[in-house]
Structures are given as structure tokens and as C-alpha cells.
Image (tube, rainbow, N blue to C red):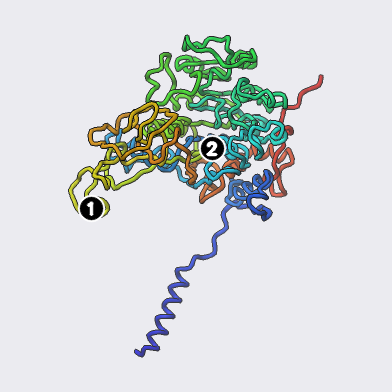
């Protein structure tokens, strides 16, 4: 065969292989509905309406309108980065006596997965308020915003006409039962974004709101939990921490004799809630929660501040329920309503532990969230209940080195000669000859230089420094128990609190409409996945005139239009 013949043959074969290997035209997604979205300049053209319509387009184009969900449960692992998920998966597996890598957390068995882009309108790396507002309203907003579109943080007057309707308020307006569960204060960013409207996440009780903001018409977040009943009945279940935000300085805490409430306005919001729900039950410990299982409405405030970390629940003097127990109690109450329900459950303290540079608490609380998701799966059917698990943002937790299979996830790295694998199993050494751990943080209070609270060297939880000295080198961890619950992983950059991370987080889903959840999506699209996959929610939006000719909710709803009509007589 001549050179020319060989060349022609080779070219023909290459073209043939290329033709065979090319990607065929994408098949149309079943149930997909096209929604036009205007082209804009970023970020100048990102209006609330644009965010809402673009999220609606992505959900409809993925087939979310095919969903027939009666109930929706959103689980939010606050600060639950993909690294946190991977490490917690191994942590749980090893706690059960296995190597760990083969393990899966409960939601990792869900059939639908996706990635969420978490940035705020004004920040690459977001906070929990702006991210949760995106999830609950379908509109991205600024860092610190609770239930309002982007504006100026702390500017009350600017925010008053920027309130956004949340899917919890929408569900209430549609006569569905609604619930909120969190291990944080119920007034904290994530739970607050389901029911409140404030440009500043820190306005949790009346003493937090500046006088100028009060004069302009802004109210604290705690009282908004009660006033959100204007959309229907308000949350029939609200379980979490934060007793101090709801009680006055004259009220002694029922659990701790040395504590009182924080409110100076004289309003006992617990008493007001009881008056509004005379058959309901207010509880503040595990036994009371169990005894109230038949109550038609539940308010549970289990700590003056945040609830305890999972590892610390055993130390609670009155008994504190687990996140799984709270979830089961919420489902038990809400599932009695034939119209269906929506429920938000937050594993809040994953975030707090990461901020504190303490991986043990972050991982154990992630496992507690997995237990809660498992409890919800067992209590519901994937035929009528859409369950979504996601995070609001990431953290700077690192998973590094070449630890051997089954190496303790909180331990020091042991390998067989690194990537080359040419030696026997032994403790890995850095360039200084010192051992190091598999998990570390890019920044945070685990920085090993001396601080005003602890000497140079490994740090012990809790550690809340206000000043740092430069580290002179890495500490020798040879005789340090890095698997101890109070060990704080080393941090490269000294910061008083470890920061959030800006990378994508995971979304996992099962149930009606979950097939639409795939690929990489803007975080505000999660709202649209929920409302489009739940006929009762999208019907209520269409009744208010926010849907296009195809029945897709594309226009930003006006909250006032969804409030109960009050009979003037």
C-alpha cells in the first residue's frame, strides 16, 4: 500500500471515528417547558424579576412542572461543603467499625443529584441569609438579607418595598400546613429566611433593631414568626433554639436559673403564641416534646441560644431532643393535614463547628442530619413527598495527603510512601519531618501561633481569640490526640472565625419532581423546583396571576396579594 493510500485511509478512519464519537443532538427532556429569559448585562441587569424568571425557566426546562408532590421537605445542612459530606461519610462508617470510605450518608442514596452555585449578588463567597433567601424566594440577594431583594444592608427604608414571598408563606396561603425545624435559634439566618423580611440578619429581637430602623417601620425577626400568620395560620410547627429572643428580661428561663429573656419591649412572644394556639403545646425539653405528640400545633424552644451540638446533648440537664426526633415530631404533626405540608429542617451547627475550626463537631452534626433525613424517608413515601437535601454554602475544610484506606478521618495521615506507594505503612511527614492530619482548615482559630487565649501549638475547642502572634513553625503532633472531640484542626491563615467557602455545594433529591434536579444550577432555582413540582403551590401562584400561558409561575409574586382577606364586618 502506498504512502498516499495509507494517508487517505487513515484520514477516512479518523473522520469515521469522529462521526461515531460525536454527541448526538440532546433529547428533549420529558415535560420540559421553554420559558424565554431576556439577555442582560451581569450584574447590572440582575433585577429581582430577572432572577425569578431565570430560575423559573431553568426549572421548567428541566421538567419540574411534571412533579405531583403533595408534601415537600427541604433539609439544609448549613455550611455543609462537599468536603464535609465526604469526611462525615467516612466518620460515620468508621464509627460503625468499618473502613469508612464505602459508607454513604442517607441522602447520598437519593437518585437525583446536582450542584448549586451559592454566590450572593454582592459577594463571591456568601452568607447564610442571602443564600437561604435565594432558596426560599427564588431571588438572589445581598449578603445578610432576610426575605428581601438586593439593596443596602441595614437600610430599613430601602427594604420596605422589597419583601419577597417565601414558599413557606405561599404554602400557608394555599392552605397547606407549614413547619420549621432548626438546631439554631429560630431567629437565625436560615430559619428566619422562611418567614421574615429584614435587610439585616442580626435584627433578631427588639434590642437588636436600631431606633432609626424601628422608626422607619422595621420589626425584629422574632415577632415576625408570629405575624407571618397573616398568610394563613402561620407555622404549625416551629422547633429549635432561641428562647431568649422570644421572652422578656423579666422572664426567668425555665431551664437555667441564671438566665432571663432578651426582649425589652415587654412582649412575651411565647405567651402570644400560646394565646393564638390555645390547643397547641409549647415545649422546651425532650419529655415535653414526646408528651405533646397529639397537639395540633407545636412551638419548641429548647435553649436560650442555639441548641447543643450532637455530642453535647447528653449533658443537657433537662434532656434535649435530637434533630431526628424533632423531624419525626414535625412530620407527625404536619402529616395530619390532607392538603399537604411543607417543612424546612436545618442542621445548623455544622456551620458553627466549621467556623470554630473543630471538625469533630462538624462531622458528628452532619451525621445527625443524615439520621434526620433517614427518619423522614422512613416516615414518608417517595410517591407523594419531595425531599431535597442541600447546603447554603461551603467552608474551608480540606481533605489532604495520601492516607491509606481506613485511616482514621480525624487522625494523622499514614501512608505507604505517598503517591508512589513504595514503602511500608507509616506516619506521613511534611517537609520539616513533622506529622500532619488528613483534615485541616484554610483559615480560622486553629492557627497554631500564640493567641490571647491559648499558647502556641495545637488549639483546643473552644477557642475564640481576639489577637494572634505569628507562628514560628508547625507543632509536633506526634503525641497529640487529633481524634479527640476538642482537638482543633490546624489553620493556615489566622482568623477569629473560620470563613465560608465559595465553591458549589451539593443537591440531592427524591420523590415527585426530583428528576428535574440535575446539573449545575443557580441556588435560587431550588425554589422554582419546589413550587413547580408541587401542584398546590403553582396553582396558588397562577390564581394570583403570576403564571404564563403554559402555567409556569414566571412573574415575581407580590406578598400582599397572598395575605388572608380580613372580613371588615
Which x, y percent locates residue 204? 59, 25
> In front here: 391 or 231?
391
Q: Which circle's residue, 1 or 2, is located before the other in the chain?
A: 2
Front tag of 1 and 2? 2
Secondary structure of the residue carrying tag 1 is: loop
Q: Is residue 373 visible?
A: no
Give me the disc on residue 533: none
> In front here: 111 or 114?
114
- Picture quadrant of residue 374: top left
Please tell me whether residue 119 is drawn above or below residue 248 in the rendered image. Answer: below
Location of the C terminus by quadrant is top right
Indicate left or right for 206 with 25 as reference: right
Q: Residues within 10 Å of mark 2 (few under 14, many from 20)?
A: many
Secondary structure of the residue carrying tag 2 is: loop
Indicate left or right for 195 with 98 as reference: right
Q: Are marks 1 and 2 in contact (CB under 8 Å)?
A: no
- Picture quadrant of residue 403: top left
Q: CA distance from mark 1 to mark 2?
A: 41 Å
Which x, y percent locates residue 414? 24, 43
Which residue occupies 27% across, 48% down? 431
Indicate left or right for 158 with 320 as reference: right
Which residue is tagged 1? 421
Which residue occupies 62% across, 15% down? 264
- Picture quadrant of residue 489: top left
Which residue is tagged 2? 127
Amino acid at each position: 500500500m502506498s504512502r498516499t493510500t495509507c494517508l487517505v485511509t487513515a484520514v477516512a478512519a479518523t473522520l469515521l471515528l469522529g462521526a461515531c464519537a460525536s454527541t448526538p443532538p440532546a433529547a428533549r427532556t420529558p415535560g420540559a417547558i421553554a420559558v424565554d429569559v431576556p439577555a442582560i448585562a451581569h450584574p447590572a441587569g440582575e433585577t429581582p424579576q430577572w432572577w425569578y424568571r431565570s430560575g423559573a425557566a431553568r426549572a421548567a426546562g428541566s421538567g419540574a412542572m411534571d412533579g405531583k408532590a403533595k408534601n415537600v421537605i427541604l433539609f439544609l445542612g448549613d455550611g455543609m461543603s462537599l468536603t464535609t459530606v465526604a469526611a462525615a461519610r467516612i466518620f460515620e462508617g468508621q464509627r460503625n467499625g468499618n473502613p469508612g470510605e464505602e459508607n454513604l450518608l442517607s441522602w447520598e442514596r437519593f437518585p437525583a443529584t446536582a450542584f448549586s452555585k451559592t454566590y450572593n449578588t454582592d459577594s463571591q463567597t456568601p452568607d447564610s441569609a442571602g443564600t437561604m433567601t435565594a432558596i426560599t424566594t427564588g431571588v438572589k440577594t445581598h449578603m445578610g438579607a432576610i426575605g428581601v431583594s438586593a439593596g443596602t444592608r441595614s437600610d430599613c427604608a430601602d427594604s420596605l418595598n422589597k419583601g419577597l414571598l417565601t414558599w413557606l408563606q405561599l404554602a400557608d396561603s394555599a392552605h397547606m400546613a407549614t413547619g420549621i425545624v432548626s438546631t439554631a435559634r429560630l431567629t437565625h439566618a436560615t430559619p428566619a429566611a422562611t418567614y421574615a423580611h429584614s435587610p439585616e440578619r442580626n435584627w433578631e429581637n427588639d434590642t437588636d433593631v436600631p431606633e432609626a430602623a424601628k422608626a422607619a417601620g422595621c420589626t425584629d425577626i422574632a415577632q415576625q414568626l408570629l405575624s407571618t400568620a397573616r398568610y394563613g395560620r402561620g407555622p404549625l410547627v416551629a422547633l429549635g433554639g432561641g428562647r431568649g429572643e422570644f421572652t422578656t428580661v423579666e422572664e426567668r428561663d425555665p431551664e437555667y436559673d441564671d438566665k432571663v429573656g432578651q426582649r425589652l419591649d415587654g412582649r412575651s412572644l411565647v405567651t402570644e403564641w400560646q394565646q393564638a394556639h390555645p390547643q397547641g403545646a409549647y415545649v422546651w425539653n425532650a419529655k415535653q416534646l414526646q408528651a405533646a405528640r397529639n397537639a395540633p400545633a407545636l412551638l419548641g424552644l429548647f435553649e436560650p441560644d442555639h441548641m447543643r451540638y450532637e455530642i453535647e446533648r447528653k449533658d443537657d440537664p433537662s434532656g434535649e431532643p435530637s434533630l431526628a426526633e424533632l423531624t419525626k415530631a414535625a412530620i407527625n404533626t404536619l402529616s395530619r393535614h390532607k392538603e399537604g405540608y411543607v417543612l424546612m429542617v436545618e442542621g445548623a451547627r455544622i456551620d458553627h463547628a466549621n467556623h470554630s475550626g473543630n471538625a469533630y463537631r462538624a462531622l458528628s452534626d452532619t451525621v445527625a442530619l443524615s439520621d434526620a433525613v433517614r427518619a423522614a424517608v422512613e416516615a414518608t413515601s417517595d410517591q407523594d413527598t419531595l425531599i431535597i437535601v442541600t447546603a447554603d454554602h461551603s467552608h474551608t475544610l480540606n481533605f489532604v495527603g495520601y492516607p491509606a484506606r481506613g485511616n482514621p478521618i480525624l487522625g494523622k495521615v499514614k501512608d505507604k510512601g505517598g503517591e508512589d506507594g513504595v514503602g511500608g505503612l507509616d506516619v506521613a511527614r511534611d517537609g520539616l519531618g513533622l506529622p500532619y492530619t488528613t483534615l485541616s482548615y484554610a483559615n480560622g482559630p486553629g492557627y497554631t501561633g500564640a493567641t490571647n487565649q491559648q499558647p502556641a501549638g495545637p488549639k483546643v475547642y473552644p477557642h475564640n481569640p481576639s489577637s494572634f502572634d505569628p507562628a514560628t513553625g508547625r507543632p509536633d503532633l506526634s503525641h497529640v490526640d487529633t481524634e479527640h472531640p476538642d482537638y482543633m484542626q490546624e489553620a493556615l491563615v489566622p482568623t477569629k472565625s473560620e470563613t465560608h467557602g465559595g465553591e458549589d455545594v451539593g443537591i440531592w433529591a427524591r420523590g415527585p419532581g426530583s428528576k428535574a434536579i440535575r446539573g449545575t444550577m443557580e441556588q435560587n432555582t431550588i425554589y422554582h423546583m419546589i413550587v413547580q413540582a408541587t401542584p398546590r403551590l403553582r396553582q396558588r401562584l397562577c390564581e394570583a396571576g403570576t403564571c404564563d400561558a403554559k402555567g409556569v409561575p414566571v412573574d415575581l409574586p407580590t406578598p400582599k396579594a397572598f395575605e388572608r382577606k380580613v372580613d371588615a364586618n
